[in-house]
């Protein structure tokens, strides 16, 4: 490749320059192509284990296949099922409901906290907070789910706390409750993601030009006005990152729900991730599982791209 | 003056509330782990006679040693290789003007948004066709590919932040791209590489869906995958399950606390570079 392209590059070089020039530009082109040697080793596993499975998902989604026998081509039948049958739409609906808990609550609470925390002097206390708030982000989600299953259980600390403040009447097995199960698993997501958002946003605030705050104060802005006029616009990029990361976490949630409820009771907490896993590995409906997988992928892109465009927009 | 003083007090109070909320599930699983074996504990209550021995029982019941060993082997197989591949590609894309480099970068960026669930079914059949199901390779090889988008993205951003004169000076001295990578860029990238290493360690240790889909034997899974199997077996024994869960999450907490300063700063910086 390098050898072949060298002469062409020499010809393309500007002729009147010193004698060494063609050789040098040939060498620089060779050098540019040799850069592929650095990139290729990373691309091989990426193409093999991400790009190829992605394309295979699309292929599988057009077939009716039980994973072992012969596959029958069915065209768009699986997609029609995913997008029209109630059983298949319910998980997608739940995924969007989870955005409230995975994105709106952590980003909203994170913003308020970060604004209040701005100016907290560095020291032991600041470090301790950082470590503690970040802990849920570090442990396996499976362990978090096991801990929360215990918190929500009949004898768990939530019911203990409710009884202690005289609300013994509302205690229940939260994860088994048809009305509350989705809220309960959603709040686990808020717990995991609040620390991440708060810390991201505090870092963002510390980068905002101090003179903007001084100017706002001189104009007589109150705390709320200051927050709306200076802090919020200054954090657009960080908010964009928080929203992107947490929306993906909501739409593609799996670990927490698989461990706490497996999608139940009934299908009250069924989400696309658990649905795909169930269809592919329990019910052996590979085509339908793959159509779900492609729809999930498309949904993520559909939601993420506008957010990215908005948060990266130049002023 | 008073306003900022009040703000600090309000901020601290709010922080303490958030910290307590964050710690409650940990506290509740911890007190449950110390209750008498086989009992059914209630909420958070410090047992009158804490059974520290439960941790040892859980260690044996879950056969934790081979389990943690397996997870460590997978980490050893994934992390150094992933770091090297990501660093090389990041260097290539950041400093060498590779023909088609922009396209490669965009292709990798796409991978940042792909949910693992969208890949899990074909990954199963792919790994099966390689004859690798139920082996640690079934996790090591796909994870290498899955880490490339973030790894390359991260290393590329870091190499781009280095001053350009560095490369130019070395090029004038006649150093080729390989020499420059090994002698100049790689040593300079130690901070970026070490935070990436911690991140890759955590992601591997905590990897769940791949482990339960591709490996049946808990002794060949990641720690999180093994915890899933442990939960299936001892789901009703709250005391033993709590002790086992704490043991399996312990390494992640320890690594995080040791490296936290480094880690949080780098992670936040990295994600904001967007």
Image (cartoon, helix red, strand yellow):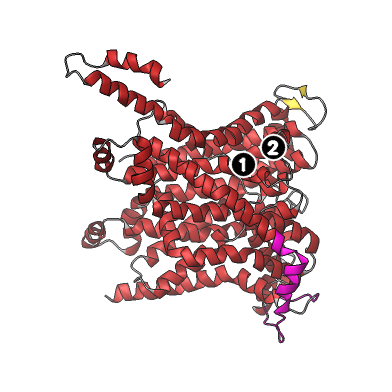
Q: Is residue A230 above or below residue B248?
A: above
Residue A93 location, quadrant: top right
Q: Earlier in the sequence, mark 2 or mark 1?
A: 2
Instruction: Judge the density around disc 2: few (<14), some (14-19), many (≥20) Cα neighbours within 10 Å.
Output: many
Instruction: Judge the density around disc 1: few (<14), some (14-19), many (≥20) Cα neighbours within 10 Å.
Output: many
Q: Quadrant of the N terminus of chain B?
A: bottom left
Q: Which residues are magenta?
A: B38-66
Q: Is residue A200 above or below residue A88?
A: below
Residue B50 location, quadrant: bottom right
Can residue A40 be seen in this snapshot?
Answer: yes
**Residue B127: image tag:** 2
Q: Is residue B112 left or right of residue B230?
A: left
Q: Quadrant of the C terminus of chain B?
A: top left
Can residue B105 be seen in this snapshot?
Answer: no
Q: What residue lies at 51% left-to-right and 34% top-to-bottom?
A: A43
**Residue A188 location, x and y as percent?**
61, 59
**Residue A107 location, x and y as percent?**
48, 55
Secondary structure of the residue carrying tag 2 is: helix
Which residue occupies the foreground of this view, A50 or A308? A50
**Residue B262 lies in the magenta-colored region:** no
């Amino acid at each position: 490749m390098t050898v072949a392209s060298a002469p062409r590059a020499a010809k393309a070089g500007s002729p009147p320059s010193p004698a060494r020039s063609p050789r040098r530009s040939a060498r620089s082109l060779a050098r540019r192509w040799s850069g592929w040697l650095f990139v290729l080793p990373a691309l091989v596993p990426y193409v093999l284990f991400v790009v190829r499975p992605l394309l295979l998902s699309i292929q599988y989604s057009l077939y009716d296949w039980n994973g072992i026998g012969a596959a029958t081509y069915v065209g768009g039948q699986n997609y029609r099922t995913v997008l029209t049958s109630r059983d298949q739409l319910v998980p997608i609906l739940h995924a969007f409901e989870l955005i409230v808990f995975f994105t709106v609550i952590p980003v909203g609470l994170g913003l308020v906290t970060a604004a209040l925390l701005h100016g907290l002097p560095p020291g032991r206390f600041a470090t301790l907070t950082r470590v503690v708030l970040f802990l849920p982000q570090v442990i396996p989600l499976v362990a978090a789910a096991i801990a929360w299953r215990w918190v929500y259980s009949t004898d768990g600390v939530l019911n203990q706390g409710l009884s202690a403040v005289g609300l013994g009447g509302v205690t229940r097995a939260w994860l088994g409750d048809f009305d509350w199960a989705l809220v309960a698993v959603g709040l686990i997501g808020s717990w995991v993601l609040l620390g991440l958002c708060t810390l991201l946003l505090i870092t963002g605030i510390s980068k905002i030009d101090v003179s903007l705050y001084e100017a706002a104060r001189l104009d007589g802005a109150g705390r709320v006005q200051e927050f709306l006029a200076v802090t919020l616009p200054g954090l657009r990029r960080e908010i964009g990152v928080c929203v992107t990361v947490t929306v993906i976490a909501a739409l593609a949630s799996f670990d927490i729900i698989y461990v706490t409820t497996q999608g139940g009771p009934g299908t009250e907490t069924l989400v696309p991730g658990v649905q795909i896993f169930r269809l592919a590995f329990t019910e052996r409906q590979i085509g339908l599982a793959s159509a779900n997988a492609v729809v999930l992928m498309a949904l993520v892109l559909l939601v993420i791209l506008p957010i990215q465009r908005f948060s990266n927009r130049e002023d | 003056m008073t306003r900022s003083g009040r703000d600090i007090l309000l901020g601290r109070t709010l922080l303490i509330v958030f910290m307590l909320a964050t710690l409650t599930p940990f506290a509740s699983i911890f007190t449950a782990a110390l209750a008498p074996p086989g009992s059914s504990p209630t909420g958070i209550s410090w047992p009158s006679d804490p059974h520290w021995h439960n941790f040892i029982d859980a260690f044996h019941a879950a056969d934790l040693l081979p389990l943690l060993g397996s997870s460590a082997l997978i980490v050893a197989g994934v992390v150094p290789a992933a770091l090297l591949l990501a660093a090389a590609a990041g260097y290539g894309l950041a400093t060498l003007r590779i023909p088609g480099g922009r396209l490669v970068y965009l292709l990798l960026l796409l991978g940042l948004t792909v949910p693992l669930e969208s890949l899990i079914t074909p990954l199963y059949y792919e790994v099966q066709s390689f004859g690798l199901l139920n082996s640690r390779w079934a996790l090591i090889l796909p994870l290498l590919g899955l880490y490339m988008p973030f790894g390359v993205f991260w290393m590329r951003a870091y190499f781009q932040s280095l001053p350009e004169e560095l490369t130019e000076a070395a090029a004038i001295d006649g150093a080729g791209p390989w020499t420059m990578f090994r002698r100049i860029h790689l040593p300079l990238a130690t901070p970026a590489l070490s935070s990436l290493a911690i991140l890759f360690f955590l992601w591997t240790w905590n990897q769940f869906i791949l482990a339960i889909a591709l490996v049946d034997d808990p002794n060949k899974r990641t720690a999180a995958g093994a915890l899933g199997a442990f939960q299936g077996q001892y789901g009703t024994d709250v005391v033993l399950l709590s002790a086992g869960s704490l043991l399996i999450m312990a390494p992640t907490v320890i690594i995080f606390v040791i490296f936290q300063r480094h880690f949080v700063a780098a992670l936040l910086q990295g994600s904001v570079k967007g």
